[in-house]
Image (cartoon, rainbow, N blue to C red):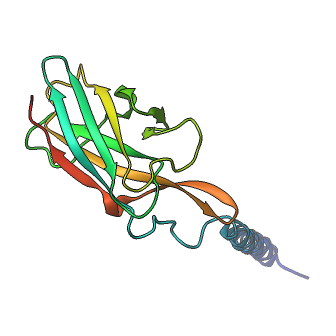
Amino acid sequence: MLSQATMFNKKGLSIVIGYILLVSISIAMSVIVFQWIKNYVPTEEVNCPEGTSIFVKSIDYDCENSILNLTIKNNGKFSINGFYIRATNVSNQEIATINLASEIITGGKLYEGSVEFSEEIENLLDPSEERIISFDVEGHNQIYKIEIVPTRIQEEEERRLLVVCGDSEIRETLTCS
């Protein structure tokens, strides 16, 4: 006959086996979910083609009326869709943090924090073309610097994606006219 101490030890053993099964099932489920989700994450980073480039042909910054006019020219090999524009109102700040896309007056439209050249989602600013874009920067004090990063629409695996061309970023220092 089993003593009472042996009965308690067997009960403790069944709890340990239950925990081992619980942990094993959790690990197996996490491996299955990981394998399933891995198929939905892109394997390669989508980049702009080399030769995508824009430059600021002219800047007209009217500090009194808080109007910023830029002439943007596509000097690259590929058409672009638009650009992100950020500014800084602190003279010694290195990284621009103010998004000016929402302040656009003419020359494009606001789309998800960027300036686009058209209502349609396509690359409309062809190589050698230029566009004049105006921003109302009232409420941001004086703007000292701007950073502009072009964007393109690209086909990847039968999907149209907005691609940020970070390698083509340009920075300009502004002076009041």
Q: Is residue 56 left or right of residue 42?
A: left
- Rendered-image quadrant of the N terminus: bottom right
**Residue 162 rendering spot, x and y as whole percentages:** 53, 52
Q: Is residue 118 left or right of residue 169?
A: right
* 50 horizontally vs 91: left or right: right
Residue at image x 38%, y 49%?
129
Residue 139, above or below 123: above
Q: Is residue 16 above or below residue 172?
A: below
Question: What percent of the width, then of the height, locates residue 170?
Answer: 25, 54
Q: Residue at x 17, y 47 (%)?
A: 172
Residue at far top of view: 65
Q: Position of residue 115 (x, y in %)?
A: 42, 38
Residue 54 relative to residue 45: left or right: left
Q: Can you tell which quarter of the image residue 177 is in?
A: top left
Name the residue at the right extreme: 1
Residue 53 lies, with reference to residue 38, above or below; the image says above
Dividing the picture into quarters, in which one does residue 37 lie? bottom right
Q: Residue at x 54, y 72 (%)?
A: 44
- Give how far across and how far down residue 125 sits, in percent: 45, 48
Task: Identify the residue at horizontal 39%, vertical 62% (top origin).
Answer: 52
Q: Nearer the viewer, residue 91 or 170?
A: 170
- Looking at this view, name the residue that lies furthest to the bottom: 1
Nearer to the camera, 120 or 125:
125
Give the camera-side residue of 86 and 19. 86
